[in-house]
Image (cartoon, helix red, strand yellow):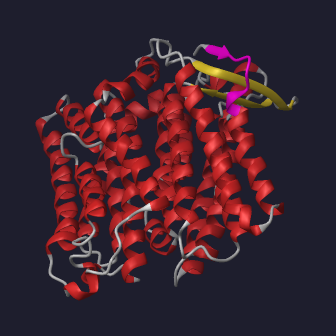
């Protein structure tokens, strides 16, 4: 894996800017808190745009903008930061969605107290997430991975809805307990490296060269898998997610669905498939089965929900099933589908949760029965709802079309029966999205209640536009995104085939 060092510390700057502005939020007068937070997220997003522009797309398998700082010399622990094509996409998703969440929060009436703590939590979350996707030292990755728990715990527990404390505790216990398996797995791969080479190392580049006995490789693979399956989440590890989403504030749900869930799928691809190729090939049928079960079970659970936030939460579980199914098909189209669906779902899930939050601001309920016809007198909002929903459904021209379509192509390489199972999952996705659209657009509600609604505007409209535009760009110009990560998935496939 080639490394390209940088003369300018773009990645560490992306880590530091939101952290510095989070610190500034603590000290500035309260009337400036929103402006300072917007400036911090905006500057970080501008840095990510510079990185997108300067990235060498002819070498997407190489780790570019690489920086390295020694933390603990004895164990060779280093702050190793860089971006290949895969992490570049997740890094850009992080800076974009973090900015969207803060723009949304500026005029969110639910966020009317403890503003310093609220914006501090979201800015620190952005900093930690950049660390997650840019780290190439597995121990440092683990530290950032765990740190994202803390601000999100408070975001749910302090600014959430009625059952916020229960949901926050459940979220923390599930993720923290599962992360202990990851810590044991990281210790195991470091010990294996010491056994093979005579030195400890947590560097991803060094660990790629580890050799394992078959039983040990499967055992360590499963340690990593349990942690990431809970984070993703996959059935049956998913039960924390609907509670967390159902009670989180809108911006919390946006960050949780769009970025934090991708930590799990990104790590499955980067570490499980990247570091343990032999175990991956052996366990592939079980992983694909778990993915398909997740798609179908979560789709059924989605359509029976009467709370729109839990509806969107279960739909997110179903989409993560598509990502994992595609990933573990272990062919070129499958890996392309999984990465594209990760990014596409980040856009659509964030928009769907903002749609739920916007309607709640008008009707003060998430109950689907009470949302009937609620977009009827808001034409701009209605267009946003339709665009987001059709994209999430997987219609051509929408962002999720390419993920679902390529997953079916990847499955067909094995059998038509497997492709039909994936197709059935796509059918269920269409069914529950159409049910939501029927409720919001076609069902009858007393018009005197709806006619006074003001359409989406201002900061909330800006938040939607920042998501809807990429949704359409992905749908109509997918090659722009495929070009970002083709080299990265090529490297992973070569590693699986033992060609490197």
Closer to us: 244 or 252: 252
Image coordinates of residue 418 in percent, x first then y, are: 18, 41
Q: x, y (%) of residue 434?
A: 17, 62
The residue depicted at 34 percent of the width and 77 percent of the height is 307
Measuring from the top left, give residue 314's x and y in whole percent. Answer: 35, 64
Where are the magenta residues, as a range? 3-11
Residue 147 visible from this viewpoint: no
- Write down the quadrant of residue 406 in the picture: top left
Question: Residue drawn at (29%, 48%), measured in percent from left and top?
Answer: 289
The residue drawn where x is 59% and y is 23% is 208
Task: Name the one closer to the observer, 180 or 15.
Answer: 15
Q: 162 above or below 341?
A: below
Residue 71 drawn above or below residue 242: above
Note whether 33 is above or below 94 in the view shown: below
- Residue 9 colored magenta? yes
Left or right position of 167 against 235: right
Q: Is residue 149 left or right of residue 453?
A: right
């Amino acid at each position: 894996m080639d490394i390209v060092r940088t003369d300018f510390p773009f990645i560490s700057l992306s880590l530091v800017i939101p952290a510095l502005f989070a610190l500034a939020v603590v000290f500035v007068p309260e009337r400036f808190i929103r402006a300072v937070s917007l400036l911090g997220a905006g500057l970080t997003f501008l840095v990510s745009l510079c990185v997108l522009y300067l990235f060498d797309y002819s070498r997407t398998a190489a780790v570019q903008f690489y920086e390295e700082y020694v933390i603990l010399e004895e164990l060779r622990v280093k702050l190793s930061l860089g971006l290949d094509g895969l992490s570049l996409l997740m890094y850009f998703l992080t800076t974009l969605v973090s900015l969207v969440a803060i723009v949304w929060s500026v005029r969110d009436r639910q966020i009317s107290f403890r503003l310093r703590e609220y914006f501090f939590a979201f800015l620190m979350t952005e900093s930690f997430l950049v660390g997650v996707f840019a780290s190439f030292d597995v121990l440092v990755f683990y530290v950032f991975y765990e740190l994202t728990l803390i601000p999100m715990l408070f975001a749910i527990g302090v600014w959430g809805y009625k059952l916020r404390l229960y949901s926050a505790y459940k979220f923390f216990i599930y993720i923290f307990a599962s992360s202990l398996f990851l810590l044991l797995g990281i210790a195991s791969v470091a010990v294996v490296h010491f056994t093979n080479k005579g030195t400890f190392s947590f560097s991803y580049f060094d660990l790629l060269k580890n050799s394992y006995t078959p039983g040990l490789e499967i055992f360590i693979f499963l340690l990593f898998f349990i942690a990431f399956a809970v984070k993703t989440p996959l059935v049956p590890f998913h039960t924390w997610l609907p509670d967390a989403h159902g009670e989180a504030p809108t911006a919390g749900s946006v960050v949780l669905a769009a970025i934090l869930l991708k930590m799990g799928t990104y790590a499955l691809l980067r570490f499980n498939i990247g570091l343990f190729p032999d175990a991956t090939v052996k366990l592939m049928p079980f992983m694909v089965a778990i993915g398909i079960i997740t798609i179908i079970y979560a789709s059924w659970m989605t359509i029976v929900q009467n709370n729109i936030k839990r509806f969107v939460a279960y739909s997110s579980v179903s989409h993560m099933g598509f990502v994992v199914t595609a990933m573990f098909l272990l062919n070129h189209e499958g890996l392309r589908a999984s990465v594209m669906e990760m990014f596409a779902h980040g856009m659509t899930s964030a928009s769907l949760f903002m749609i739920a939050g916007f309607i709640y601001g008008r009707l003060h309920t998430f109950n689907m029965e009470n949302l009937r016809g609620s977009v009827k007198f808001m034409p701009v909002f209605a267009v946003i709802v339709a665009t987001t929903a059709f994209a999430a459904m997987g219609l051509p021209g929408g962002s999720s079309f390419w993920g679902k379509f390529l997953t079916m192509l990847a499955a067909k390489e094995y059998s038509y029966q497997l492709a039909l199972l994936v197709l059935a999952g796509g059918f269920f996705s269409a069914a529950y999205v159409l049910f939501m659209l029927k409720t919001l657009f076609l069902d009858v509600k007393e018009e005197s209640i709806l006619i006074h609604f003001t359409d989406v505007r201002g900061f909330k409209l800006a938040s939607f536009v920042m998501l809807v535009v990429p949704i359409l760009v992905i749908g109509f110009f997918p090659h722009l995104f495929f070009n970002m990560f083709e080299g990265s998935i090529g490297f992973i496939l070569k590693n699986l085939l033992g060609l490197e």
